[in-house]
Image (cartoon, coloured by chain):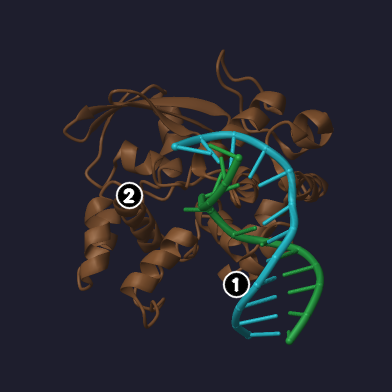
Chain colours: A brown, B green, C cyan
DNA sequence: ACTCAGGTATCCT
DNA sequence: AGGATACCTGAG
């Protein structure tokens, strides 16, 4: 089905934003995302027109929310125009959106992410999905459920390049398996409470918990600090970054900085 | 061969 | 509280 968007929507920016690990370019103007148990292919037709290979029903029920189409990103970009650096970052990141991704998948993905490059994270996640996730089509597997990870052969899990993170993932799988409604419970918490609750998991510190909250629980005010963000803040905000200025959208600003600064410096 | 990667836990002072 | 260090392993 064809869609036309007025607000920011750039598949390349989203795919390269570091918030998702199963969102890849597969052709000249074509991207494929495996998420929520489905495979979606989107073609950029130019002039803000996009071809989604899904039913209009699926778009309304699933992908509209996944792509956060009810948030006005262009007005968030406008809100930083008083700051030269942030304004430049936003200008380089036009089309960015914070996805509504699966909460469990974010827990595991960001536990995996520590001390790994993005390509290495993607490799690990794909191996894990192939090992124990439901088969969706000839080439793709869904992200495994907590039960599927718990029942998988540990030796094969160890072969997914998870390293010392494997026990963390198994612990998290036990937690989510034992409490099937855990995401509903966590959804009700305040940002601060959610952060504390997430950090109770082994292998989840400030940065990983913030990523889970921002990309899984869609708490748009979380501001994960990774090496790139820290470099950018040291360079451009030597006196500290005021988290009150852009609330409640600090997380969106963080994505603009991450995307623009990392692309400029690496 | 060698460094570093979107960090965290642990052990210090 | 804040600083130093080890940690699995793949990608460049």
Q: Is residue A69 above or below residue A213?
A: above
Residue under the image location 67 percent in, 31 percent down: A128
Residue under the image location 22 percent in, 64 percent down: A87
Q: Name the residue furthest top.
A: A138
The crowding category of the residue bearing disc 1, from other C-alpha atoms within 10 Å (few below 14, some 14 to 19, many at least 20), is few
**In front: label 1 or label 2:** 2
Q: Disc 1, disc 2: CB below 8 Å?
A: no
Q: Mark 2 lies on which chain?
A: A
Sequence-first disc among 1 and 2: 1
Which image quarter: residue A123?
top right
Res A250 seen here: no
Q: What element carries label 1?
A: helix
Q: Is mark 2 on a helix, strand or loop?
A: helix
Q: Mark 2 points at which residue?
A: A263
Residue A228 x/y as whole percent: 43, 59
Q: Mark 1 lies on which chain?
A: A
């Amino acid at each position: 089905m064809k869609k036309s968007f007025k607000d920011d929507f750039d598949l390349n920016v989203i795919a390269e934003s570091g918030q998702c690990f199963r969102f890849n370019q597969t052709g000249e103007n074509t991207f494929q995302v495996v998420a929520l148990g489905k495979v979606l292919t989107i073609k950029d037709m130019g002039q803000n027109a996009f071809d989604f290979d899904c039913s209009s029903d699926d778009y309304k029920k699933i992908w509209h929310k996944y792509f956060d189409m009810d948030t006005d990103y262009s007005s968030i970009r406008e809100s930083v125009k008083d700051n030269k650096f942030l304004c430049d970052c936003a200008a380089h990141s036009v089309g960015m959106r914070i996805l509504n991704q699966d909460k469990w998948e974010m827990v595991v993905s960001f536990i995996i992410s520590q001390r790994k490059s993005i390509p290495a994270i993607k490799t690990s996640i794909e191996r894990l999905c192939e090992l124990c996730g439901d088969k969706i089509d000839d080439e793709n597997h869904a992200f495994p459920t907590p039960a599927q990870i718990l029942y998988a052969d540990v030796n094969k899990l160890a072969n997914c390049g998870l390293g010392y993170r494997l026990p963390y993932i198994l612990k998290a799988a036990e937690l989510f398996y034992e409490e099937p409604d855990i995401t509903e419970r966590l959804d009700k918490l305040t940002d601060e409470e959610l952060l504390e609750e997430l950090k109770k998991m082994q292998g989840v510190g400030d940065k990983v918990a913030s990523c889970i909250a921002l990309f899984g629980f869609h708490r748009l005010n979380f501001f994960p600090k990774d090496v790139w963000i820290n470099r950018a803040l040291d360079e451009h905000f030597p006196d500290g970054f005021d988290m009150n200025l852009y609330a409640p959208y600090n997380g969106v600003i963080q994505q603009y900085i991450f995307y623009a600064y990392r692309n400029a410096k690496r």
